[in-house]
Amino acid sequence: MPFNIQEGIPPQVQQVMKDAEVTMETTVSGKTLTNKRTILGRTTENTIILGEECEETDPNGTKRKVTCTLEGDTLVFLYPNHDGKGLEVRQTFRWEGDKTMRMEYKVGDLEGSAEMQKI
């Protein structure tokens, strides 16, 4: 069931997020994945071991458990308790061509997707 990601988000915040530039750098060395994200002036860097449960910190400073795996050509992040109340979130990232990355997500029973362009 698709959902509106903007539902419940004030219009001012929606506009800020729409205009925000997000920079992501991901490096892989063996089974170690390092992800550096900058959004709205906040930078976080997380190192994850593929196939192992690890702790990740988001740009707001929230820490949560995540397991990252590689399924074929798709990078999968599984958050078994995203909100601290048992909400399971699954995010996948897959390249579609040389410059387009497709992100799909499932939040509880809701599903959605987005595309990002490589600069």
Image (spheres, helix red, strand yellow):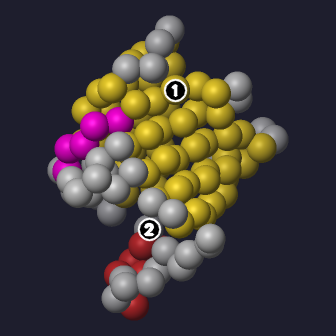
Classify 14 as above or below 49. Answer: below
Picture residue at 50% right of the left edge, 19% below the top? 28
Q: Is residue 116 visible?
A: no
Most foreground residue, 100 or 80: 80
Picture residue at 47% right of the left edge, 13% below the top? 31
Q: In the visual, does 62 lie left or right of 70?
A: left
Q: In the visual, does 100 lie left or right of 67?
A: right
Dot 2 amino acid type: Ala
Most foreground residue, 60 or 118: 60
Counting other residues with Cα less than 10 Å from the Cα at mark 2, is it few (<14), some (14-19), or many (20 or more)?
A: few
**Circles 2 and 1: CB atoms closer than 8 Å:** no
User: Magenta part of the protein: which range?
Assistant: 62-66
Q: Distance between the residues labelled 2 and 1?
A: 28 Å
- According to the picture, the residue beneath numbered tag 1 turns out to be 69
- SS at circle 2: loop
- Image quarter for residue 57? top left
